[in-house]
Image (cartoon, rainbow, N blue to C red):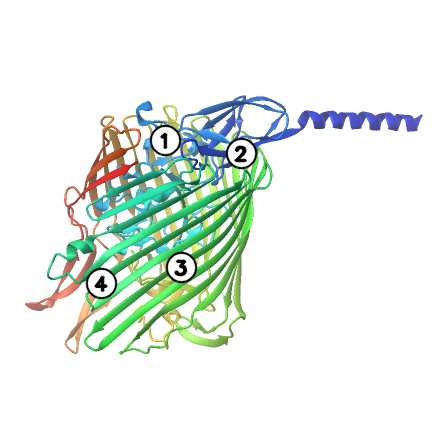
C-alpha cells in the first residue's frame, strides 16, 4: 500500500514538472539589425515586445540581439534614433532567426528628430533606464553642423563640450576626463589603441568623421571588457561600407579636403570603404619666398572591408594610416603618425551566444631631425602593440546580458633616443612587456525598476627581459639588474571590480550610483598640459608601479515634456595611487647613459566634482548646456613640501552652451559658447643673474593660473534640394567671433631697457578664423 502511494506520488510529481516545463519552455528570437539602404549593422538598437514592454534588449556593437519568449504570437517593435520605427508580427513555437531592416527617416519627414542632436541615445529615455553611468554616444551624421576650428568636423572636439571632459588647450584635441591626464584616456579605433590622436600639434584629430559609424565615451565607470586606462574609454568604430550600392562623398575646405568611396565587393555579401584626407597649407607656403621650402601637412587614410562567410559568420579587416610632416628646408624636420590594423571574426555560435575574435596591431612613432652647418641631431621613439582579444556576449535570458573573455597584448617600447654629431649615437634597447586580462560583466535587469551592471577584471603586467632595469627611491639609484631576453621580470597583478546601478523612481526620473577600480601600466611622460608628439611612453617597471584609480559616483536624471527635455547631474570622487610627476629641476637627456626614471617621483592624487547637463532634444531649437565644478590635486613626496598641489589639468569651472536652430528646410544655424578657468601653471617668483644670464626662481608647483578662457563660435549650413543621386551642402563659420585673445603660452623676460624688472609675454593663436567648406555625396 505504501509502495503504491509513493508510485502514485512520483508519477504525479513527474506529471507536474513535465507540465510546468512545457508551460515555461522558452524559445529564442535572435538576429541582426541593419540599415536597409546600405546594409550597415546598427549599434544599440532597442528591440522590444509590444505585449510586454518590460521584455526588451539592446543590440550589441555588432548589431546582434537575442530575446527569450514563451510560445505564442508577438508584435516586435524596433526603434533607433533617425530611423522609422519598425514593427513585425511573429509566431514563436521554435527558435526564430529574425534579421531586422531599418529605414532612415528623410529630413522632410521630421521637423526635428532626436537624430538632429549631436548627443543621442538608443532611445529617448536611455538616461533613465540604463545602469551605465558617465556615458555619452555621439551622432556622427550631424557633427558638421557644429562650428569648429578650420571647419573640420571632429569627434574629439565635440566630446570636449560635454561635462567632465576638459580641453587641454586652444585648438588641442587632447582632453582630460574627471581629473585624469591625457594618457589616462583609452582611445580605440575598431578596437585598436591610438596612442596619439592628434594632427598638427592638436588642431585636428586623427578621426576623419566621414569614415566613422559610431563613437562613445565612458567616464571611468566602464564595463569590465575595457581596461588599461584610469579615466575614460573613447570607443570609435569605422563604417563597414555600403554592400548594396556605390557611394562617393567628401568635402573641400580652405586648408583641407577629404574623399570617401564605399560600395559592395559582392552585393549584399561583402563591402569596402576607403576614406582619405589631406591638408594643403604647404601649397600656400610654396608661393612665398621665405617659406617655399617648408613642409606643413598631414594625411590620413581609413580602409575597411568585410565578407559574410555565411549567415552566422563574418570577417572584417580594417586599417588606419596617418602621418604629420613639419619641416623648414634642410634645417629642421619632424614627422609622427599612427598605424593600426584589426582583423575581426564575428560568429553567431547559437541563438544566445555571440563571439568576436580580434587580432589587433597598433604602432605610434616619431622622428625629429636638426641640421646646422656640419652638426646633425636626430631623435626617435616608437610604441608597438600586438593584441589578441576573444570576447563573448551571452544573452542568458531577458534579464541577463553577459560579456566575458580575455585579452593579451605584447608591448614593445623603443625609448626616446638621440643620434648625431654632438651626442652619443648608440640606440637604446627596446623594452618589451606582456599585458593580459580576463573579465566578466553582467547587465542585469533585477526588477522592472532596478538595473545593475557589475563585473570583474583580472589584469596582469609582466616586464620582459632584454635590457638593464634600475630601481630608484626618490630619484636615487638603489639597485640595477640586467634581465636576459626572453626572461620574465617583475609582474604586477590587479583585481578590478566595477558595479553601477540604476533605480527608476518613476516614469520621468531615476537615480544611479557606481564604483569602479581601474589600473594602468603604460604611462606618458609629458611636461605640458596639452601634450607634444615627442612625449615619451614608458611601461611599468621595477621603479614605476601600475597607476590605480578608485572612483565612486552618484547621479540623478529627470526628463520633461515626453522625454524631449532632460537634466542629468552626477557627483564623483576619484582616489589615485602611484601618480607620476617630474621632480623639481628635472633634466631630461636622450643620452644612452641617462635613465628618465631617475627624474620621476611618485605619489597619490584625488579628483572630485559636480557635472550638470541640460538638453533640449526636439523642436527647431536643440542643444545643451553643460557645467562642471571640479578639483584635481596631487600629493607627491619631494614636490611642494610634500603637500597637496594643483594638477596641471585642474580647472575649477567649465561651461559649454551649444545650440542648433533649424531656420528652414535648407538653412540651419549653430553656435557655441565656452568658458573655463585657466590651467594651473607655475610662474616665477624671483630671479637672479648668473654669468650674464637671468635665471628665474620658482616656488610652489602649479600655484598660479593662466587667464580664464572663453570664446564664441557661429556657423551656418545650407543644404539645397538634392537629386536622387547627388546631395551637396555648404558650411560657413567663424571661430572666435568676438576676437578674444586667449593665452596659449605666457613667458617671462627682462625688459630690455630696464633689466631689473620683468614682463610677461602672452602668445595667442587665433583671433578670428573664418571657414567655408563644400560637402558632397553621390
x and y percent of residue 740 in the render? 16, 46
Distance between the alpha carbons at the discs numbered 1 and 2: 32 Å
Quadrant where the C terminus lies? top left
**Residue 211 falls in which quadrant of the image?**
top left
Is label 4 in a helix, a strand or a loop? strand
Q: Which residue is mark 4?
A: 327
Distance between the alpha carbons at the discs numbered 2 and 4: 53 Å
x and y percent of residue 190 in the render? 43, 48
Tags 2 and 4 touching, CB below 8 Å: no
Distance between the alpha carbons at the discs numbered 1 and 4: 49 Å
Q: Earlier in the sequence, mark 2 or mark 4?
A: 2
Please state which of the two labelled residues, at mark 1 or mark 4, is closer to the viewer.
4
**Residue 439 placement, left or right of 124:** right
Q: Which residue is mark 3?
A: 363
Q: Pick the residue in front: 345 or 765.
A: 345
Within 10 Å of disc 4 (Cα), the crowding (few <14, some 14-19, many 20+) is many
Is label 2 in a helix, a strand or a loop? strand
Q: Which residue is mark 2?
A: 31
Q: Earlier in the sequence, mark 1 or mark 4?
A: 4
Q: Which residue is mark 1?
A: 566
Q: Earlier in the sequence, mark 3 or mark 4?
A: 4
Distance between the alpha carbons at the discs numbered 3 and 4: 22 Å
x and y percent of residue 767 in the render? 15, 48
x and y percent of residue 294 in the render? 18, 61
**Residue 372 placement, left or right of 447:** left
Amino acid at each position: 500500500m505504501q509502495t503504491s502511494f509513493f508510485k502514485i506520488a512520483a508519477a504525479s510529481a513527474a506529471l507536474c514538472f513535465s507540465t510546468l516545463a512545457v508551460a515555461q519552455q522558452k524559445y529564442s528570437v535572435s538576429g541582426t539589425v541593419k540599415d536597409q539602404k546600405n546594409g550597415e549593422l546598427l549599434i544599440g538598437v532597442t528591440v522590444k515586445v509590444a505585449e510586454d514592454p518590460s521584455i526588451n534588449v539592446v543590440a550589441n556593437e555588432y548589431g546582434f540581439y537575442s530575446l527569450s519568449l514563451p510560445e505564442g504570437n508577438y508584435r516586435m517593435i524596433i526603434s533607433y534614433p533617425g530611423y522609422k520605427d519598425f514593427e513585425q508580427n511573429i509566431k514563436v513555437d521554435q527558435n526564430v532567426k529574425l534579421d531586422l531592416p531599418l529605414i532612415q527617416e528623410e529630413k522632410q519627414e521630421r521637423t526635428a528628430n532626436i537624430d538632429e542632436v549631436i548627443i543621442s541615445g538608443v532611445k529617448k529615455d536611455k538616461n533613465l533606464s540604463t545602469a551605465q553611468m558617465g556615458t555619452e554616444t555621439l551622432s556622427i551624421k550631424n557633427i558638421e553642423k557644429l562650428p569648429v576650428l578650420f571647419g573640420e568636423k571632429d569627434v574629439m572636439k565635440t566630446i570636449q563640450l560635454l561635462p567632465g571632459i576638459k580641453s587641454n588647450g586652444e585648438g588641442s584635441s587632447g582632453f582630460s576626463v574627471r581629473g585624469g591626464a591625457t594618457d589616462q584616456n583609452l582611445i580605440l579605433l575598431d578596437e585598436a589603441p591610438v596612442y596619439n590622436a592628434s594632427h598638427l600639434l592638436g588642431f585636428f584629430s586623427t578621426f576623419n568623421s566621414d569614415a566613422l559609424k559610431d563613437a562613445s565615451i565612458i567616464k571611468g565607470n566602464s564595463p569590465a571588457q575595457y581596461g588599461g586606462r584610469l579615466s575614460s574609454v573613447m570607443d570609435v568604430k569605422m563604417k563597414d561600407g555600403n554592400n548594396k550600392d556605390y557611394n562617393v562623398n567628401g568635402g573641400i575646405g580652405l586648408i583641407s579636403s577629404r574623399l570617401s568611396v564605399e560600395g559592395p565587393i559582392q552585393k549584399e555579401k561583402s563591402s569596402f570603404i576607403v576614406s582619405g584626407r589631406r591638408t594643403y597649407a604647404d601649397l600656400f607656403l610654396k608661393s612665398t619666398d621665405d617659406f617655399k621650402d617648408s613642409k606643413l601637412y598631414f594625411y590620413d587614410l581609413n580602409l575597411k572591408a568585410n565578407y559574410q562567410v555565411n549567415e552566422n559568420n563574418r570577417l572584417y579587416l580594417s586599417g588606419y594610416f596617418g602621418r604629420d610632416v613639419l619641416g623648414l628646408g634642410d634645417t629642421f624636420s619632424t614627422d609622427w603618425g599612427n598605424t593600426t590594423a584589426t582583423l575581426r571574426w564575428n560568429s553567431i555560435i547559437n541563438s544566445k551566444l555571440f563571439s568576436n575574435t580580434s587580432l589587433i596591431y597598433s604602432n605610434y612613432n616619431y622622428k625629429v631631425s636638426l641640421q646646422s652647418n656640419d652638426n646633425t641631431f636626430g631623435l626617435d621613439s616608437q610604441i608597438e602593440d600586438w593584441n589578441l582579444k576573444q570576447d563573448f556576449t551571452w544573452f542568458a535570458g531577458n534579464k541577463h546580458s553577459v560579456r566575458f573573455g580575455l585579452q593579451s597584448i605584447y608591448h614593445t617600447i623603443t625609448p626616446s633616443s638621440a643620434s648625431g654629431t654632438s651626442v652619443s649615437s648608440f640606440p637604446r634597447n627596446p623594452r618589451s612587456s606582456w599585458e593580459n586580462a580576463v573579465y566578466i560583466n553582467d547587465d542585469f535587469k533585477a526588477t522592472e525598476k532596478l538595473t545593475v551592471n557589475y563585473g570583474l577584471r583580472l589584469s596582469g603586467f609582466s616586464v620582459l627581459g632584454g635590457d638593464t632595469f634600475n630601481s630608484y627611491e626618490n630619484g636615487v639609484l638603489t639597485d640595477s639588474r640586467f634581465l636576459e631576453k626572453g626572461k620574465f621580470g617583475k609582474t604586477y597583478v590587479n583585481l578590478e571590480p566595477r558595479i553601477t546601478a540604476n533605480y527608476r523612481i518613476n516614469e520621468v526620473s531615476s537615480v544611479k550610483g557606481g564604483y569602479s577600480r581601474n589600473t594602468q601600466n603604460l604611462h606618458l611622460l609629458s611636461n605640458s598640459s596639452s601634450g607634444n608628439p615627442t612625449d615619451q611612453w614608458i611601461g611599468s617597471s621595477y621603479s614605476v608601479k601600475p597607476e590605480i584609480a578608485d572612483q565612486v559616483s552618484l547621479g540623478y536624471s529627470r526628463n520633461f515634456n515626453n522625454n524631449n527635455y532632460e537634466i542629468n547631474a552626477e557627483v564623483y570622487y576619484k582616489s589615485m595611487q602611484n601618480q607620476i610627476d617630474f621632480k623639481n629641476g628635472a633634466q631630461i637627456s636622450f643620452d644612452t647613459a641617462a635613465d628618465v626614471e631617475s627624474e620621476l617621483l611618485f605619489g597619490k592624487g584625488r579628483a572630485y566634482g559636480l557635472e550638470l547637463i541640460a538638453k533640449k532634444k526636439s523642436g527647431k531649437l536643440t542643444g545643451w548646456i553643460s557645467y562642471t565644478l571640479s578639483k584635481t590635486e596631487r600629493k607627491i613626496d619631494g614636490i611642494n613640501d610634500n603637500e597637496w598641489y594643483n594638477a596641471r589639468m585642474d580647472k575649477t569651472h567649465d561651461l559649454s552652451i551649444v545650440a542648433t536652430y533649424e531656420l528652414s528646410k535648407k538653412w540651419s544655424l549653430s553656435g557655441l559658447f565656452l568658458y573655463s578657468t585657466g590651467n594651473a601653471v607655475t610662474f616665477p617668483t624671483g630671479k637672479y643673474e648668473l654669468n650674464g644670464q637671468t635665471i628665474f626662481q620658482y616656488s610652489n608647483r602649479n600655484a598660479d593660473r593662466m587667464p580664464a578662457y572663453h570664446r564664441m563660435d557661429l556657423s551656418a549650413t545650407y543644404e539645397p534640394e538634392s537629386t536622387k543621386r547627388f546631395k551637396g551642402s555648404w558650411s560657413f563659420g567663424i571661430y572666435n567671433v568676438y576676437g578674444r585673445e586667449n593665452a596659449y603660452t605666457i613667458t617671462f623676460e627682462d625688459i630690455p631697457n630696464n633689466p631689473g624688472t620683468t614682463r610677461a609675454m602672452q602668445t595667442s593663436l587665433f583671433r578670428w578664423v573664418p571657414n567655408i567648406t563644400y560637402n558632397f555625396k553621390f
